[in-house]
């Protein structure tokens, strides 16, 4: 059992923790805005913005000129959907995050659906069969599923899409920062992510990659001061990925994001992935000995840093009373483990569940 003064945060899948050091970089910039905001903002754009862009691009293995800074995933996807013709045949995963599905449903696309097996597994062979039989032109899907933690094989999926000339749009909100993503090695057209979860960068920023081919095929239909150029007395519209950077950028949040990435780079993203897999397997090994119901198998095949338990006999309330923070939703408990979580914490969690089992 946990004492009343301790708290275990297993909820990065909802919102990641910002380290005090990274948080301070945002506070420091805000302080400058309290003294000379105009000069501060101009200096940031001239001296820091390109550094931010390059840091983000390097982190996901992409060219800087193929990346855009966005406020969040949903904002960008909705703008991308407006650039489509509207008659594309789209394939979606039925249990995906609603923000992945809503823009296509709201705009009345011809949608085919792929369903999970046992509320967990997504079958790549079924995806390929559906692509062939339904003549799919575009697939939008999350890299890691929010409601199960299933991690799809992006490399194999992108190969299937490339083979059948299908445009692939990926939501990486539940993976970027906790999984290695190298865009140069993937045949995908668009990757989007909000940064408040596994990137540990707070709300108000997201990242977007778009291939040159997709940008040419579907020119942006949105724009702002960021993608125009003054020629004599006229403004010239310059279609590029910068079209999706609408309005002024969130400088403070992007400062936090850059430093959050640098924090991960110091640890090593591969080390973070290895750590997360080890403590997740440790958790799985402990849970199989307890009277709880898991979603998915008890190994790391297609698993991410997210695990789902059935919320039965007051388990969620019990965890809450013992200062263990998880997501409690729809009779399930979602656990998200990241680099700041430890085996000691996982063991305390298992002891807490064991105590609940004795009481119930």
Image: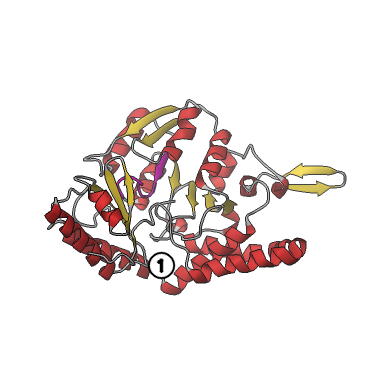
Of residues 204 and 270, the one drawn nearer to the viewer in this rendering: 204
From the viewer's perspective, tell me whether residue 122 is left or right of residue 139: left
Of residues 136 and 322, the one drawn nearer to the viewer in this rendering: 322
Crowding around mark 1 (Cα neighbors within 10 Å: few <14, some 14 to 19, many 20+) is many
> Residue placed farthest to the bottom in the image?
266
Magenta highlight on residue 339: no
Q: Which residue is mark 1?
A: 269
Residue 47 drawn above or below residue 314: below
Q: Position of residue 311 (x, y in %)?
A: 24, 46
Quick one: quadrant of the N terminus? bottom left
- State the image quarter where residue 289 is shown: bottom left
Report helix, strand or loop for mark 1.
helix
For the magenta stretch, what is the residue range?
Answer: 138-150
Residue at (44% x, 51% y) in the render: 173
- State the image quarter where residue 249 is shown: bottom right
Q: Position of residue 43 (x, y in %)?
A: 73, 66
Q: Position of residue 115 (x, y in %)?
A: 29, 35
> Residue placed farthest to the right in the image?
233
Residue at (50% x, 66% y) in the render: 260
For the stretch drawn in magenta, the main secondary structure is loop
């Amino acid at each position: 059992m946990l004492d009343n003064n301790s708290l275990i945060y297993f909820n990065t899948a909802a919102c990641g923790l910002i380290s005090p050091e990274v948080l301070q970089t945002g506070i420091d910039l805000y302080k400058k805005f309290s003294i000379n905001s105009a000069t501060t903002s101009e200096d940031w754009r001239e001296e820091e913005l390109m550094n931010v862009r390059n840091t983000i691009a390097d982190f996901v293995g992409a060219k800087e000129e193929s990346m855009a800074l966005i406020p969040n995933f949903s904002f960008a996807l909705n703008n991308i959907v407006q650039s489509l013709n509207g008659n594309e045949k789209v394939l979606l995963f039925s249990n995906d995050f609603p923000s992945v599905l809503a823009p296509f449903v709201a705009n009345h696309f011809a949608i085919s659906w792929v369903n999970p097996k046992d509320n967990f597994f997504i079958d790549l062979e079924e995806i390929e069969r559906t692509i062939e039989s339904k003549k799919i032109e575009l697939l939008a899907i999350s890299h890691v599923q929010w409601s199960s933690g299933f991690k799809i094989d992006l490399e194999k999926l992108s190969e299937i899409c490339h083979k059948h000339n299908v445009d692939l749009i990926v939501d990486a909100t539940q993976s970027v920062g906790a999984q290695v993503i190298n865009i140069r090695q993937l045949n995908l057209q668009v990757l989007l992510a909000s940064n408040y979860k596994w990137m540990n960068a707070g709300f108000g920023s997201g990242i977007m990659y778009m291939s040159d081919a997709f940008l040419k095929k579907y020119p942006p239909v949105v724009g702002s001061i960021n993608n125009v150029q003054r020629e004599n007395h006229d403004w010239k519209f310059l279609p590029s990925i910068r079209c999706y950077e609408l309005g002024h950028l969130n400088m403070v949040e992007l400062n936090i994001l850059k430093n959050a990435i640098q924090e991960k780079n110091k640890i090593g993203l591969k080390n973070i992935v290895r750590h997360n897999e080890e403590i997740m397997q440790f958790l799985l090994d402990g849970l199989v000995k307890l009277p709880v119901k898991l979603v998915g198998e008890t190994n790391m095949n297609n698993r991410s840093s997210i695990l789902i338990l059935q919320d039965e006999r007051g388990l969620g309330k019990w965890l809450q009373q013992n200062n263990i923070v998880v997501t409690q939703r729809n009779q399930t408990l979602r656990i998200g483990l990241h680099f700041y979580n430890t085996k000691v914490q996982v063991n305390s969690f298992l002891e807490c569940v064991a105590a609940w089992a004795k009481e119930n």
